[in-house]
Image (spheres, helix red, strand yellow):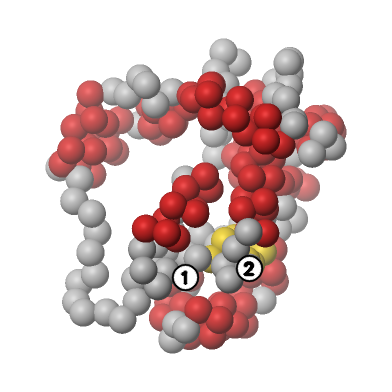
Amino acid sequence: AAQRLFESAGAAEVSRCFLRPGIIANRLKAAELLAVPERPLGRTDAIIVKSVYSVLAAEWIAARFDEVQVVLVLRDMLSLLSSWVALDWLPGADERPHDSDSSLQEALRLRHGVPPPTAGSPLARVTWFLALLALTLEATVRCHPGWHVVRYEDFCEQRGERFRELAARVGLASSAALAAGRRGSGGPFESIASSPPEAWRSRLTGDQIAEISAVISAF
């Protein structure tokens, strides 16, 4: 029931709830209440969980769970933004992805000293937002040398080898790591390396690349 409610909302409605969490449609609230957390089908030695929404909660997650292994996947900003463009995830002209929590935005701005663009297209605003999150994540990583950091582009070039190396680092059977990342597996790492690292060259126009580069230069 929760899945049907979630799917009935449509991509635009779901995107709006991430941009403006204070305004969530009733069907999505009902889906949240009815949702049942996924659990392994049987007994297992390891559980792999992936989230793209935990950048600011990584330290909390690491502290909350015992013996957790944290793996952070970093990605080139042009590559990341080209995926947002291809998936039509950019907000509307009157929406700002960072306005959902103005106090958090201000705290991050003061911490890193990079103010949001006062003008510009939705692409420029999203670029600032994602670059700020990346900067925050890099600062967090420096405080936790025991965390594992990998690059999306490396997995694109040598998928099988990189998964085996990562499995060895986190103490996971390589077969399990490969299954989690195999295309069509539905595993938590399937999306890693699903898009070629140079795809941004055909997805972004020259003007878009220039606009992104101008925003990133402030960081």
Q: Relative to 103, is 200 on the left or the right? A: right
> Which element type, helix, strand or loop, lies under badge 2?
loop
Q: Relative to 195, is 60 on the left or the right? A: left
The residue depicted at 46 percent of the width and 78 percent of the height is 177
Where in the figure is residue 15, as x and y percent of width and height? 44, 31
Q: On residue 58, which mark appears?
A: none
Q: CA distance from mark 2 to mark 1?
A: 12 Å
Give the position of the C terminus as an image quadrant.
top right
Given the image, on which type of amino acid does mark 2 rest? Pro
The residue that disc 1 covers is: 69
Q: Nearer the viewer, residue 120 or 102?
A: 102
Q: Is residue 74 above or below residue 146?
A: above
The residue depicted at 66 percent of the width and 76 percent of the height is 158
Where in the figure is residue 44, as x and y percent of width and height? 27, 79
Given the image, on which type of amino acid does mark 1 rest? Gln
Decide which of tag 2 and tag 1 comes sooner along the chain: 1
The residue that disc 2 covers is: 145
